[in-house]
Image (tube, rainbow, N blue to C red):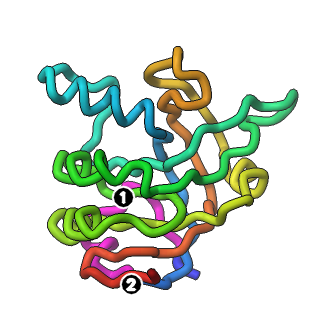
């Protein structure tokens, strides 16, 4: 098991190989389909984003509301292929890593290589487990999208697998 502290950095990314098991600690952002559409619309208009993309990690998830005494509700990964049309552009803007589930397109794979970025796979159906890794949660953009808004999560020992590395290796 490899422990990673974010930001990932290109040297750390270069050392990861498809199939490596990791525990991620640090800041990640959540964003699903609707948030990606808004992010790209803002980029199209030349508008500043409400968060930094450079070296960020986007988790394809939408946290459920927290129960009393909890930081977050269930927060499992969504199908990454739904972000295939957005991911290469965000990677080209400096995104450092993606977390989701399932295979992504060849175009995303090429963008990962081009930008020395990594795609981490989460475990489908393990939203409650992931909620236990969340230390803090704050909505930072698009609150009208509810669970699909962009949240800043602080995570500790968030389990994942390197699905696609920055050398083109893939578990798929």
- Indicate whether residue 11 is drawn in magenta: yes
Residue span colored magenta: 3-16
Measure the C-alpha gap from mark 2 to mark 1: 14 Å
Name the residue: 26% across, 73% down: 11
| SS assignment at label 1 | strand
Q: Quadrant of residue 25?
A: bottom right
For mark 1, does the 10 Å Cα neighbourhood hold few (<14), some (14 to 19), or many (20 or more) residues? many
**Where residue 79 sits: x, y (%)?**
53, 55
Rendered-image quadrant of the C terminus: bottom left
The residue nearer to you, when weighing 14 against 78, is: 78
**Residue tagged 2:** 17
**Where residue 143 sits: x, y (%)?**
52, 18
Considering only vertical position in the picture, is 106 above or below 42?
below
Considering only vertical position in the picture, is 17 above or below 125?
below
**Residue tagged 1:** 97
Is 61 on the left or on the right of 118, as rendered? right
Name the residue: 59% across, 22% down: 146
Q: Quadrant of residue 49?
A: top left
């Amino acid at each position: 098991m490899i422990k990673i502290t974010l930001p990932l950095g290109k040297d750390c990314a270069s050392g990861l190989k498809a199939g490596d098991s990791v525990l991620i600690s640090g800041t990640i952002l959540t964003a699903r389909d609707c948030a990606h559409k808004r992010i790209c619309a803002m980029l199209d208009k030349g508008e500043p984003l409400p968060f930094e993309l450079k070296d960020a990690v986007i988790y394809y998830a939408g946290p459920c509301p927290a129960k009393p005494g909890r930081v977050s509700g269930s927060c499992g990964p969504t199908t990454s292929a739904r972000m295939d049309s957005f991911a290469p552009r965000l990677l080209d803007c400096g995104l450092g890593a993606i977390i989701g589930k399932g295979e992504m397109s060849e175009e995303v794979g090429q963008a990962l290589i081009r930008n020395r970025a990594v795609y981490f796979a989460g475990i489908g159906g393990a939203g409650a487990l992931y909620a236990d890794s969340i230390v803090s949660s704050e909505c930072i953009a698009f609150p009208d999208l509810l669970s699909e808004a962009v949240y800043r999560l602080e995570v500790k020992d968030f389990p994942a697998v390197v699905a696609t590395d920055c050398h083109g290796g893939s578990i798929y």
